[in-house]
Image (cartoon, helix red, strand yellow):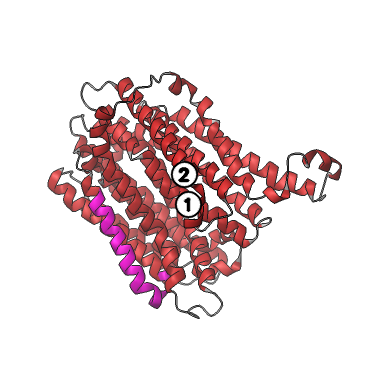
Amino acid sequence: MSVAKKLVGQTAAYGLSSIIGRTLNFLLFPLYLGIFAPEDYGVINGLYAYVGFFNILFTFGLETAFFRFANQPGADRQALFNRVLSFLIFSSILLTGLILLFIEPISRLIKFPDQQLFIGWLAVILAIDAIVSIPFARLRLENKAGKFAGIKMANVLITVLANVFIYWFCYNVYQENFLASLKPIIAKIYFPEWKLGYIFLINLIANLLLIPLLWREFSSLRFSLDFSFMKPLLRYAYPIMLMGFAGIVNELLDRILLLELLPTGFYPDLTSKGAVGVYGGCYKLATFMTLAIQAFRYAGEPFFFAQAKVKNSAVTFALVTKWFVIVCAFIFLFISVNLEDFKFLLRRPSYYQGMAVIPILLLANLFLGVYYNLSAWFKLTDKTYFGTFISFGGAAITIILNILLIPVLGYMGCAWATLACYFSMALACYLFGQKYYPIPYPVGKIAGYLVLAISLILAATYINIADFIGRHAFHLGLCGIYLLLIFFLEKPQLLIKR
C-alpha cells in the first residue's frame, strides 16, 4: 500500500497547482468579458487554439521518451537530459525563427492578419514551453513533486495577479472609476489600444520567469547536440506526437463542426454561434474530471515506467487503475446529481439549457482517463505506434459521429460523439494491451462501479423531489450509497498491510 500512498501523494501535489491555476483562470473569465467585445475574446481563443496545436509540434513527444529512456537499465540520466534538452533548445529556436520569418503569410493563413505582433510573442512562448518541459520532466522523474508544484503555482500567481493589476486596477483607474488621482501614473504603463496585447505579454513574461525558477536544473545542462543519439528517442516519440494531434481533433473539432453543421433554427433562441457558446460553456464543468486526470497523469507516467522494473508490477497497475476509476466515478456521480448547485459557474441563465451534456462529457472524460491508464502498456513495450492507430481511430469516430448526429441532436450529438470516441479508445487499448502486455485488471469490478454510478445518476434524474432540502438530501444520500458500497466491497484490501 505504501506504493499506492506515494502515488496518491504525488498526484495531490501535482494536481494542486493545476486545480488552483484553472480555478483562478476561470475566475478571470468574467473580468475579461467586462472589457472585451466578443470579437476580441474570439481573437484570444482563436490564437490560443493554435498554440495548443503547435505546442505538440514543438515538444515532439519527447517528455514521454525522456521517461522511457531514463528508466532503461544503466541509463545515464544526466547525458540523456543534456542531449534531449539541447535538441529542444535547437529545434525551438529554429521553429520560432521560421514563424517569425514567415509571420505575414502565416497570419493571413490562420485569418489573423492584424495580430502579427501577438503571433510573434506566442511563437516565443511556444519555444519557452518546449524548453522548460524537460526540466519539469526531470523534477517528475526525481519525484520532486513539491518543487514542481511550487514553480507551477508561482507561474500561475504571476499570471493571475498581473491580469488583475492590468485589467481591473489599471483599467478602472484609467476609466476614473476609482483613485482617479493615479491616472497620470497609470497612463504611463496602461494603453487602452493594447487591451488584447497585455494577455499575451503577461503570458510571455510569466513563461520567461520560469527559466530562473528552474535555474538549478538548467545550470546542470552541458549542451550536447547529438542527432544520432536522438534518432531512437524521436522514433519512440513521434507516434506520441501524432497522438497529440489526434487528441486536438477529438477535443476541438466538435465546436467547428457544430458551427458548420447545425441546421438553421435548430434552437429557436440560438444561432449556431450561440449554440457553440452554450456547449463550450457547459463543457467547462467537465473540467473537474479533467483536473483529476491531469493530476494523475503528471504522477502516473513516471510511476508506471519506474514500477515496470518491480516484481508484480502488473498487479500494481491493475490496482491503480481500479482506484482511479473508483475516484473518478464518484466525481462523475457527485457533479451529475448536484448539477443545479453548479449553475452559478455558468454565470448566465442562457447556458442552462445545455446542462444535459455535462454528465455525458464527464463520463467521456472518465473513459479518457482510463485510456491514459491503459496506455502504459504500449509505452513500456515501445509499441507507441498502437497509440497512434487508436488515437486516429478515435478522431475518425469523432468526425463521423459529429457529422451524423449534429443535424439531428445538436450539441447533444457532440457530447455523445465525444463519449463514443473515448470509450472506443479505452476499449481498443485494453484489448490490444491484453494481447501484448497482459495486466490482470478487475474488469468486472470496474464495470460494476461505473454501472453503479450511472444507475444512481438515473435515479436522481427520474425521481423528482420538489422540496429543495429533501431533494438535496436524496442526492447526497445517493453519493453516500456509492461510498458505503465501495467501503464494504473494498474493505478487505483497505485493511491489508502492505
Q: Which residue is identified by label 2?
A: 99
Disc 2 crowd, CA 10 A, few/some/many (<14, 14-19, 20+)? some
Query: In the displayed image of the protein, which residue is found farthest to the left?
Result: 435
Q: Is residue 429 left or right of residue 8?
A: left
Please tell me in which quadrant of the rendered image residue 479 appears: bottom left
* Image marks 1 and 2: residues in contact by CB distance under 8 Å: yes
Q: Position of residue 296 (x, y in %)?
A: 38, 41
Q: Which mark is residue 468?
A: none
Q: Nearer the viewer, residue 419 or 320?
A: 419
Q: Main secondary structure of the magenta part?
A: helix
Residue type (three-letter) at the residue carrying disc 1:
Ile
Q: Which region is colored magenta?
A: 388-412
Q: Position of residue 467 (x, y in %)?
A: 55, 69
Q: Find out whether residue 406 is within the magenta segment.
A: yes
Q: Which residue is identified by label 1?
A: 106
Q: Residue at x 42, y 73 (%)?
A: 261
